[in-house]
Image (tube, grey):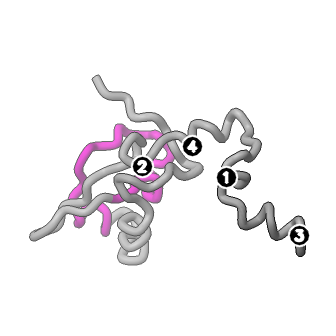
Amino acid sequence: MANLRDYYRRNFLYQSHRLMLPELREKVVHTCSECGFFVQVAGKTETRPGCAAIIPYYASLAGRVPRELKVLEVLQAVGKNGLEQVLAGAGPHRQACGLFHLKMDK
């Protein structure tokens, strides 16, 4: 065996046995689509998924996060660069980020 450290680094079965802190489990187990900040950003012709945690009003939990936001509302709140971050930050099947809050559906 050439190098024991390389053996464990390349072994995919061994990589799945990692220790995880209990408070991080919630973020690892859930996806973006289960997050309360996951919204659909609606433009004129298309609707894309986005993360409302970038918008300060929703990140502070001052207001309820709607299921759909208009592009103009996002542009007014965070500007053009912020809109790019909102659209780049979320995907329905992506692993949840550190700002994860479980969606409260009624």
Give coordinates of residue 88: x percent, y percent. Answer: 41, 68
Q: Earlier in the sequence, mark 2 or mark 3?
A: 3
Say whether residue 19 is left or right of residue 91: right
Q: Residue at x 43, y 57 (%)?
A: 55
Amino acid carrying mark 1 in the image: Leu
Amino acid carrying mark 2 in the image: Cys
Residue farthest along the left direction in this orientation: 45
Q: Residue at x 45, y 34 (%)?
A: 102
Give coordinates of residue 72: x percent, y percent. Answer: 23, 66
Q: Mark 4 to mark 2: distance in Å? A: 9 Å
Q: Nearer the viewer, residue 72 or 2?
A: 2
Amino acid carrying mark 4 in the image: Lys
Q: Which residue corresponds to mark 3? A: 1
Task: Provide the secondary structure element on which disc 3 rests.
Answer: loop
Q: Are marks 2 and 3 in contact (CB under 8 Å)?
A: no
- The local crowd at label 3, few if under 14, some if 14 to 19, many if 20 or more residues have their Cα within 10 Å, is few
Q: Earlier in the sequence, mark 2 or mark 1?
A: 1
Q: Earlier in the sequence, mark 4 or mark 3?
A: 3
Q: Residue at x 68, y 35 (%)?
A: 23
Residue 13 numbered mark, or none: 1
Q: Nearer the viewer, residue 15 or 92?
A: 15
Q: In this rendering, which labeled residue sits more in front, label 4 or label 3?
A: 3
Q: In this rendering, which labeled residue sits more in front, label 2 or label 3?
A: 3
Residue 27 numbered mark, or none: 4
